[in-house]
Amino acid sequence: MKSKGGKYVKEKLILFIAVIVFFGGSKLINITRAFTHHYITSLNGLKPTIIFTNTLITIAQSSNLTASKIRPETGTFIKDSPRDGYCILTIKNQLNNTDAIAILTPLGSKNPLIAVYIRSRDSFTIKGIRDGTYELYFSLGEEWDDKIRRFTKKAIYEHFEDPLIFETIYEKYSTYISIKYTHLEVTLYEVIGGNTKTKRISEKEFPDLRP
């Protein structure tokens, strides 16, 4: 099935703030890109230690409550990898009536690095992404089953045609170091004047999140 939509990319430099890029999902979507500036007065080290961690949630089961009946909270990491970089990805699902799972993989691979659950009418920001080029997959649907790590009702699967590029730039001056990093913002729903395209794919083409 052909994806609908295209999308535009804005790039701006925001002093002391960030870079933003808007991408979309299987319709007309947006991506915004920006660079955030941070200033470090100490020149002893090029990069301070910044580590973002999230505990992977294991859903407890009982005779009265099974995993298939549990709806994860927005921000539940189904899959996670070390996030000690600077870059940021904001994923917006506010205009969809179904929940989403968004997955980052290395370029040219379906091996999931980060997978996060985002409820309908909500958004989430992933921090600490390392520099690199990634692919973004997402699925929309209902009735999440944590055992198979899929939506079991009304599931659709999408893949962004354009890769997401994250970059950190260090600029060393006589008394401080300036650090600029990418902040991308993507939408998983149709927008007017969208600047990126997604492709509808089959369940077999979607990354496997099972342990």
Image (cartoon, rainbow, N blue to C red):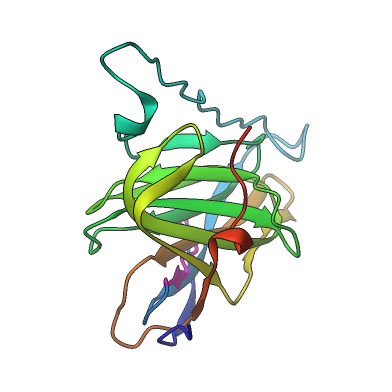
Q: Is residue 125 magenta?
A: no
Image-based side of 201 in relation to 72, left or right: right
Rendered location of residue 194, percent (x, y): 38, 83
Nearer-the-camera pick, 119 or 41? 119
Q: Is residue 23 magenta?
A: yes
In the picture, the quarter occupied by the C terminus is top right
Image-based side of 142 in relation to 77, left or right: left
Nearer-the-camera pick, 31 or 27? 27
Is residue 70 in sight in this rendering?
Answer: no
Q: Quadrant of residue 92?
A: bottom left
Q: Residue at x 41, y 21 (%)?
A: 59
Rendered location of residue 57, percent (x, y): 46, 24
Q: Quadrant of residue 132?
A: bottom right
The vertical placement of 117 against 5, above or below, is: above
Is residue 103 in sight in this rendering?
Answer: yes
Q: Residue at x 30, y 35 (%)?
A: 71
Number of on-image labels: 0
The vertical placement of 188 against 127, above or below, is: below
Q: Quadrant of residue 29?
A: bottom left
Nearer-the-camera pick, 8 or 16? 8
Q: Residue at x 48, y 59 (%)?
A: 138
Image-based side of 203 in relation to 118, left or right: right
Q: Residue furthest front?
A: 63
Q: Residue at x 65, y 42 (%)?
A: 85
Nearer-the-camera pick, 166 or 93? 93
Magenta residues? 16-25
Q: Main secondary structure of the magenta part?
A: loop
Rendered location of residue 72, percent (x, y): 34, 34
The vertical placement of 49 against 118, above or below, is: above
Rendered location of residue 197, percent (x, y): 49, 81
